[in-house]
Image (cartoon, grey):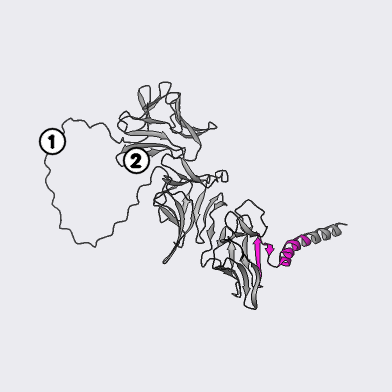
Amino acid sequence: MSKDTLKADESFGVGGSLVSKNGKFVLQLQEDENMVFYERTSNGDKPLWATNTQDSFAVSAVMQSDGNFVLYDNSRRPQWRSNTNGKGDKSSFVQIPDEGNIFIFSGGKEIWRALQQSVRPPPASTTPLVTPQPVPKPTVPTPQPVKPVNPTPVAPPVDVVAAVATSALTTLRGGQSLTLKQSISSPNGKVSLVLQEDGNLVVNYRDGNNNKVLWSAETFGKSVATARLRVTGEFSLLKSDSTRVWSSDTSRAGNTRDAVLLVQDDGHVVIFAGGTRIWRTMTPKLPGTDPDRLNADQYLEPDQKIVSPNGKTSLVFQGDRNLCLYTDTFVGALWSKVTEDRETRPSKVIMRGDDDLWYGDKGSREWTSTTRRRKGNGDASLQVMDTGVIVIKSEGLTIWSSDEKKAQIDIVEPMVRQGISLLLSQALIT
């Protein structure tokens, strides 16, 4: 049975709460580690006050015998406090009365309250007021006409819980959330991350009459209520009871507590923490973005191509699913991967985040460049060169080329130069 009072040396954990006797007011320590005071209304729970400790790893709310009400994490470190230590004793308790507030009492006296004025304060005194004496009406001069002035718009109040992103935003910061039918957009407005009404999180591309889904979390029909970015970098889809439905699995990647999610013009949705990219969506190649290359975590679909800067060489993923390199000065393909005799043909050409080029699908491949060398989030790109070759470049080096000698030169030459420098330095010493 719910109670409205927490006595000295008592506590409650995540999911625990205090409830007023009339059941209309609730103080709860939520799954996101934020402690929030709600009013229950016919239109749903209305937040009135919060500790703003989401993602703080708070696990318990303790009413101490010194009068201090404290939220502690697993390491017994305070994440929030009422700052009333020393003002109370073992008689201290925190209470949620029917009038709608949070009070701390000790020794029969109030020592702290959350709201300056309760939601439903006791009725005012019924003592009759003194009848005022009539005041002579002053003479008012006739007003002169003035030019109307447009009033300065007043900014809406900020929610005491986490701020919620609106469609005008291009970023989502740690602690912020999207609710159903809300979105954030890229700077050019063509790409948007949308939490749909069916609970599915999708990346949409819209350019005129062209509307396309670039990426999906595939969570439709799973009762998703919010999409939330934790300050530690994890992006999650949650039900109304905070049950996690989907996650980016990046909670361990960002420990700087300054995570930010961006929607980019190239179709990527990315998460940064501490200035380092820790997650990014896979996206098809969009028109008008880096026409000579396929960047990391991008892919070509049938009938797409990338073209060299001089416009004379093209890598084409043909409608017949063959991948061919053409140039204006040569009849036929300079280089190709052909699958005419295959029953199941590749549907994508993928430049993966681990520096590997795949000719196949997301989960399988017909051919690979065998250049994988990292776990992901790399910056390698497949580029079409004016010289009639395609190369994979990573950190300034060519790690693969359709002309094998080119890749060998770029990898070996720095090693040779380093060896020569070492020999020269040794000769000078001797």
Tell me the kind of residue under disc 1.
Thr
77 horizontally vs 121: left or right: right
Residue 68 location (% of width, % of height): 44, 28
Quadrant containing the N terminus is top left
**Secondary structure under badge 1?**
loop
In this view, the residue farthest toward the right is 430
Q: On the image, which quarter does residue 189 sit in? A: bottom left
Residue with the mark numbered 1:
131
Label at residue 19: none
103 horizontally vs 381: left or right: left
Q: Is residue 16 above or below residue 423?
A: above
Viewer-closest of 108 and 77 = 77
Q: Is residue 271 above or below residue 64?
A: below
> Is the residue marked by circle 2 packed among few (<14), some (14-19), or many (20+) residues within 10 Å?
some
**Secondary structure under badge 2?**
strand
Viewer-closest of 50 and 211 = 211
Residue 66 location (% of width, % of height): 45, 24
Structural distance between the alpha carbons of marks 2 and 1: 40 Å
Quadrant containing the C terminus is bottom right
Residue at the spot 38% in from the left edge and 33% down from the top edge = 27
Q: Is residue 361 above or below residue 327?
A: above
Which region is colored magenta?
A: 387-416
Residue 354 location (% of width, % of height): 63, 54
Res. 244 in view: yes
Label at residue 46: 2
Is residue 54 covered in magenta? no
170 horizontally vs 96: left or right: right
> Is the residue marked by circle 1 packed among few (<14), some (14-19), or many (20+) residues within 10 Å?
few
